[in-house]
Amino acid sequence: MVHRILIVTAVAAEADSVSAGLALGGPGLLPLPGGLVLRRHTGPDDGGPLVDVLVGGVGPAAVAASTGTALAHASLTSPGNPYDLVVSAGIAGGFQPLAPLGSVVVSASVIAADLGAETPDGYLTVEELGFGRSAHPVPDALTGRIAAALDTGGLPHTVAPVLTVSTVTGTAGRAAELAGRHPGAAAEAMEGFGVAEAAAAYGVPVVEIRAVSNAVGPRDRAAWRIGEALGALRHTFELLSRTVFLEPSP
């Protein structure tokens, strides 16, 4: 059964929405090294899910360190009972028209969009340079289960690559460059790849789930829909906590 889940957000407002949506008890608070705190939600009995929500920080480096801390703590305190799933969650920019504002993007893959090198002949990924990796694919079986839950709940969504960037896109030119380099990408955020790297080090499956608050491109703050996106994030985890988090793994 999928019953022990770690959900990592960048900031407290995202974690608040996730926690508010979980149809579980709690949260209790569990301190971790480095001043981190897990919000622990549990099911109604011993057979129910255990879901930890962590505010991991902004950017791939901060969130990789905090996710690694949570995973290390779990491996030390619960030997033989690691997390079954790690989720990078929050709001994000959506590539239009693939990911409308207020919709949800489920990652088909988690991609470090700017981890590589610029050359006179164009951009090269770290794989093309001969070292490292810049993508974590997500199993179709996992994304399919999440998409089915969102379908049932009537929540608009798409399954597509999600990009991790260190600098949020602010121009139409940059948006077009990223879309051209990563065809089919539906969203960009700043943490997914860091979470995925930490999860991979512990052999735990990972998925990124993003509610779209703004369009990727010129920064038009008047057009942002942060409240709507946080509401969609809450609804997403309400649906998942009643379905996917209780389902047997494939």
Image (cartoon, grey):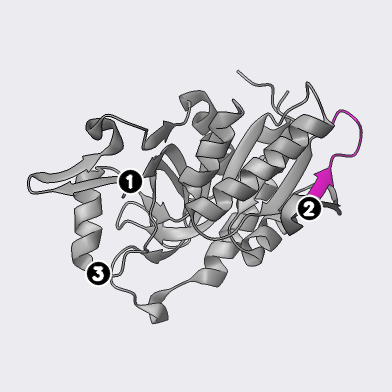
241 to 188, vertically: above or below: above
The amino acid beneath tag 1 is: Leu
Dots 2, 3 in contact, CB < 8 A: no
Residue 198 x %, y %: 56, 38
The Cα atoms of the two marked residues, 3 and 1, are separated by 19 Å
Q: Residue furthest right?
A: 45
The amino acid beneath tag 2 is: Arg
Tag 2 residue: 39
The residue lying toward the viewer, choosing from 18 and 151, is 18
> If the image is split into quadrants, where does the C terminus sit?
top right
Of the residues under marks 2 and 3, which one precedes in the sequence?
Answer: 2
Residue 107 x %, y %: 45, 40
Q: Residue furthest left?
A: 121
Q: Secondary structure at mark 3?
A: loop
* Foreground disc of the pair 3, 1: 1
The structure residue drawn at horizontal position 64% and vertical position 33%, both measured from the top left corner, is 85
Camera sees residue 179: yes
Magenta span contains residue 37 = no
Of the residues under marks 3 and 1, which one precedes in the sequence?
Answer: 1
Disc 2 packing (10 Å; few <14; some 14–19; many ≥20): many
Q: Toward which corner of the image does residue 205 lie, by quadrant? A: top right
Instruction: Say the numbered circle drawn on residue 115.
Output: 1
> Total marks drawn?
3
> If the image is split into quadrants, where does the N terminus sit?
top right
In magenta, the rendered stretch is 40-48
Camera sees residue 145: no
Tag 3 residue: 171
The amino acid beneath tag 3 is: Thr
* Foreground disc of the pair 2, 1: 1
Disc 3 packing (10 Å; few <14; some 14–19; many ≥20): few
The residue lying toward the viewer, choosing from 1 and 201, is 201
Q: Secondary structure at mark 2?
A: strand
